[in-house]
């Protein structure tokens, strides 16, 4: 049985519109126009134990709303969901003891106290036995390299250090299911990398089922085999990351370095070979239909002063951008 | 129960961080005490009895307000139920096996414990400064009745103020003002500024149909012997009924609120 299963889930928000300016504010005191925003619109998917799935999509696509519904924070407008066999929005303690939600932009730590106090509090709230608590804390703080920071007031920590503490606080009860909403947001590249490594290890070592949302493709590329792409509340793709490339990347990029400047005829002829994505001598990136890439490469080698040539798959970022900017999909 | 004990301990630590806030809060209480104290002292220069209160009785009342207020009407310096609902921080608690209402009640109790300790010192100090004639109850049953009434009042007030803050569920933008207004009104109607029986009889009667006098006025009346014998039992039972009603109403409002909670802010 799937650990997480979602079927025909929808969540609509009622939002009121305010006309601009003070007059609009006064008007909105007396009458408000409400309309529905379909944050999540009839989505279904299943996730098996131990999977690490990436949710990607632009801002407002419905990623966070999905995670909040699965955490039991929101009642869905329609549809069903179950996590570990529980209905999330019933908020049963047995369920809550087995999952954690980490939101990169929200903190649960006590701002004015050292992080260790928040850990102790969570230990009691989740009723973690002493021995297990000590072991988990020890392990996590070693993995994340924050052993020396446990007794420092949270407000004095850097963003990266704080995020690590947030993770420890969320993991102190060893959850089986983990929802990570933008865990690397605002972190520098080094800290992002560390966070990613940690998530990977946690997933493998504890067989934890993880859903991760992120704006950074690097997070998803490095961590997730499977991705779910959400846009405007609907799932537009659900499958292996590499399949996105096969499915949507009907082009390959030829990256060429020339030996010497091209003459006018060669330049003009270049345009007939494919789409020029980038050209500043001596470097050229040429976009060609997938099936033609070998032919075009041969032609280039034959009649151009080529020093170096590579055939590359499109960047995943580019493909996803194309998916979102309405190139017809699904 | 260990859960909430830890909340209690961590809350106390947090209160110590906000010691400056805390001290100012105590100063405010003393200033207000001095204000009402001198106001009534001034009035009694020209009169020997006002609204049926002798000078000593009135000053006893003012003194007792300082104590009862510390127990009943105080809230932790970081009390922010409305804010947490409005900005979505409530989500942090909702995903955990912890009751939000019990959590904040525990924090409330922690803050009150600290306030109480300070109030004891203040009262001793003020006592030596003003030497008010306070008639202590000699009957143990009366003291017990007073303490029980304080306990019930504390619960009623906590639930009332929680409900006032739940308005954030429906209007996340503008709750602070409303909650503030409601709490000031409660303080006046509870008898936190003056004894309620100096009001016109009709208003006083009307107030008795509300939970407010049970917060400050009745406990002090029990202490100072204005309410005696079986009447004490009646007041305590009535308080207990209000606790039950408020528990039901708070849960009802919470459930309604949860249906519309949008866990905003990311």
Image (cartoon, coloured by chain):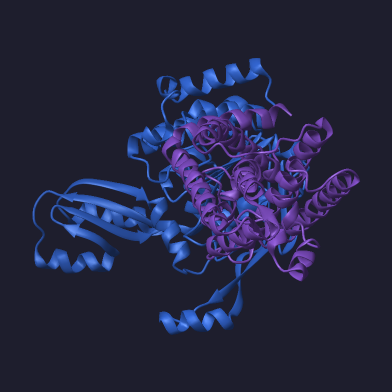
For the view shown, which residue lies furthest in the top direction? Answer: A131
**Would residue A207 be seen by someone viewing this image from the given angle?**
no
| Percent coordinates x, y for residue B12 in the rendering | 55, 31
- Total marks shown come to 0
Which residue is located at x 82 percent, y 55 percent? B245
State the residue in front, A60 or B127: B127
Chain (blue): A
The image shows residue A70, relative to residue A321, as above or below, that is above
Q: Quadrant of residue A152?
A: top left
Q: Quadrant of residue A267?
A: bottom left
The image shows residue A152, relative to residue A306, as above or below, that is above
**Would residue B173 be seen by someone viewing this image from the given angle?**
yes
Q: Quadrant of residue A274?
A: bottom left
State the residue in front, A306 or B144: B144
The image shows residue A140, relative to residue A34, as above or below, that is above
Classify residue A199 as left or right of residue A176: left
| Percent coordinates x, y for residue B155 in the rendering | 73, 45
| Percent coordinates x, y for residue A312 in the rendering | 35, 48
State the residue in front, B151 or B189: B189
The image shows residue A323, relative to residue A297, as above or below, that is below
Q: Chain B takes which shade in the image? A: purple
For the view shown, which residue lies furthest in the right direction? Answer: B230
Which residue is located at x 58 percent, y 80 percent? A32
What is the quadrant of the N terminus of chain B in the image?
A: top right
Classify residue A107 as left or right of residue B262: left
| Percent coordinates x, y for residue A79 in the rendering | 75, 60
């Amino acid at each position: 049985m799937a650990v997480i299963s979602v079927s025909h889930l929808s969540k609509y928000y009622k939002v009121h519109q305010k006309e601009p300016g003070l007059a609009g504010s006064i008007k909105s005191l007396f009458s408000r126009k409400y309309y529905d925003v379909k944050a999540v619109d009839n989505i279904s998917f299943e996730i098996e134990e131990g999977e690490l799935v990436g949710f990607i999509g632009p801002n407002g696509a419905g990623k966070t709303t999905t995670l909040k519904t699965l955490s039991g924070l929101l009642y869905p407008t329609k549809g069903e969901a179950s996590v570990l066999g529980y209905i999330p929005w019933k908020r049963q303690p047995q369920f809550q003891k087995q999952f954690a939600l980490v939101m990169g932009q929200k903190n649960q730590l006590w701002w004015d106290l050292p992080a260790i106090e928040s850990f102790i509090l969570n230990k009691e709230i989740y009723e973690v036995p002493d021995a297990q608590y000590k072991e988990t804390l020890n392990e996590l703080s070693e993995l994340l390299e924050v052993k020396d920071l446990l007794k420092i007031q949270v407000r004095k920590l850097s963003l990266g250090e704080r995020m690590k503490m947030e993770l420890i606080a969320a993991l102190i009860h060893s959850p089986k299911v983990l929802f990570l909403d933008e865990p690397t947001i605002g972190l520098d590249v080094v800290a992002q990398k560390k966070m990613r490594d940690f998530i990977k290890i946690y997933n493998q070592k504890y067989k934890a089922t993880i859903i991760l949302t992120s704006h950074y493709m690097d997070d998803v590329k490095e961590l997730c085999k499977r991705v779910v792409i959400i846009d405007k509340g609907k799932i537009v793709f659900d499958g292996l990351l590499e399949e996105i490339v096969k499915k949507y990347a009907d082009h390959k990029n030829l990256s060429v370095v020339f030996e010497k400047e091209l003459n006018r005829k060669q330049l003009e002829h270049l345009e007939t070979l494919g789409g020029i994505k980038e050209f500043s001598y001596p470097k050229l990136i040429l976009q060609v239909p997938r099936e033609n890439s070998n032919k075009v490469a041969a032609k280039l080698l034959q009649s151009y002063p080529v020093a170096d040539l590579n055939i590359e798959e499109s960047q995943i970022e580019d493909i996803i951008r194309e998916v979102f900017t309405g190139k017809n999909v699904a | 129960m260990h859960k909430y004990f830890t909340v209690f301990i961590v809350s106390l630590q947090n209160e110590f961080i906000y010691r400056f806030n805390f001290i100012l809060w105590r100063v405010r209480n003393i200033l207000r005490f001095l204000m009402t104290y001198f106001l009534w002292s001034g009035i009694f220069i020209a009169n020997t009895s006002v609204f049926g209160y002798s000078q000593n009785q009135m000053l006893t009342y003012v003194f007792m307000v300082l104590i009862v207020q510390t127990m009943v009407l105080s809230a932790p310096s970081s009390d922010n139920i409305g804010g947490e609902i409005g900005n979505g921080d409530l989500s942090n608690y909702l995903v955990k096996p912890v009751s939000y209402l019990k959590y904040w009640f525990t924090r409330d109790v922690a803050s009150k414990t600290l306030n109480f300790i300070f109030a004891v010192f203040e009262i001793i100090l003020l006592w030596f400064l003003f030497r008010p004639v306070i008639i202590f109850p000699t009957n143990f049953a009366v003291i017990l009745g007073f303490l029980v009434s304080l306990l019930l009042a504390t619960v009623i007030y906590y639930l009332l103020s929680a409900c006032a803050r739940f308005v954030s569920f429906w209007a996340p933008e503008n709750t602070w003002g409303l909650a503030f207004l409601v709490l000031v009104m409660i303080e006046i109607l509870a008898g936190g500024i003056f004894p309620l029986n100096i009001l016109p009889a009709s208003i006083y009667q009307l107030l008795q149909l509300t939970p407010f006098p049970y917060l400050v006025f009745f406990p002090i009346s029990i202490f100072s012997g204005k309410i005696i014998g079986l009447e004490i039992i009646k007041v305590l039972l009535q308080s207990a009924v209000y606790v039950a009603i408020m528990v039901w109403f708070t849960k009802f409002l919470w459930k309604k609120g949860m249906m519309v909670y949008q866990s905003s802010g990311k």
